[in-house]
Amino acid sequence: MVPRPPDGLHRPTGLQRTRGFHLIRDDEEDALPLPKGEREVPLMITDRSFAADGSFAYPAADPTLRQPGVTSDFVSGVLGDCILVNGAPWPALEVTNTRYRFRILNASNARRYHLALDPAPSQGPAFVQIGSDQGLLAAPVQHDRLQVAQAERFDVVIDFSAYRVGQQVTLVNELGTGGTANVMRFVVARTATEDSRIPAKLADVEPLSISDAATERTFTFARNGAQHHGMTPWTVNGEVFSPEHLWAEPALGTVERWTLRAQNVPHPIHIHLAPFQVQDGNRYASGWKDTVDLASGDQATVLIRFDGYRGKYVFHCHNLEHEDMAMMANFQVR
């Protein structure tokens, strides 16, 4: 593997501004006095491994990629030993002593992150969450750390006025070790005029009620069943993915109550083009979501509103190795 920097972080080299992001805005959001321009930064976090020559290293079971799957040591998910942010390993970003808005995406195959600031701010929360997977929250939520599963998005504000000019602040991963314990570094380089604030109300978010649900369904995500491509597959309700099979046929404009269950290992469940609200979630699962993280043996109840377009969609575990080994299912909006 390529050697890591001695302190786990590169010297300040700047940060790529865009890398695979689509940011959707509307007039409601643009009217808010949140950090904008150079103080709004996307952070796509992922982990990768590299060979000694710098090439991408991935433990595919078949190097020709004609057959799916990974080698047996990585069936539960591939974890890399190098953290990338917007494609750069352990980058650093110069900031002013003002508020910044960060659009955080966990784009890793299988790695979860517990993000925190080191040192923690001397006053106030480390993060103020203003948005989730599907847009703004109704009101801001304060966090000392963020639990971010694969595919989840967190829209947060960090106030660097809590640090002195010249101070370095590391975004750390409390679940990581060695090179995966550090994500990136902020360098408070200079003073600037603060021109933003976080309002008490962010957006109108209509709360769904269980009484709105026209149908209830239960889906269990587990590794079981007959061998599939030479490996025990990851399944939904005991079945591997089939393009022809439909697990649900909701009517356009209706709400359904789905109970999602995880077995064997944690599973982040992602539902395509059908926003939902987590009914028994924690402070990390507020607002409109499309991904919910489940620990092994855990379950969540979500209320899904099918108000987009008719057609066939999928839902699946967003651990990419689980998804690639058939942990996916279809539903059809009629």
Image: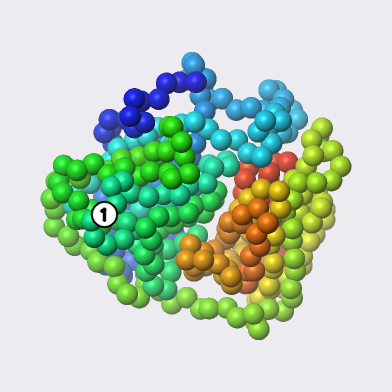
* Callout 1 secondary element: loop
Residue 186's spot in the image, x, y percent?
27, 43
**Quarter of the image containing the C terminus?**
bottom right
Relative side of 34 to 240, left or right: left
Residue 191's spot in the image, x, y percent?
13, 50
- Foreground residue among 289 and 20: 289
Residue 280 visible in this rendered orientation of the protein: yes
- Answer few, some or many: residues within 10 Å of disc 1's Cα (few below 14, many 20 plus, some between 14 and 19): some
The picture quadrant where one finds residue 99 is bottom left
Q: Residue at x 65, y 59 (%)?
A: 298
Residue 315 visible in this rendered orientation of the protein: no
- 230 up-or-down from 136: above or below: above
Per the image, the residue denoted by label 1 is 121
Relative side of 82 to 190, left or right: right
- 290 up-or-down from 174: above or below: below
- 111 up-or-down from 57: above or below: below
- Foreground residue among 17 and 212: 212
- Foreground residue among 38 and 91: 91
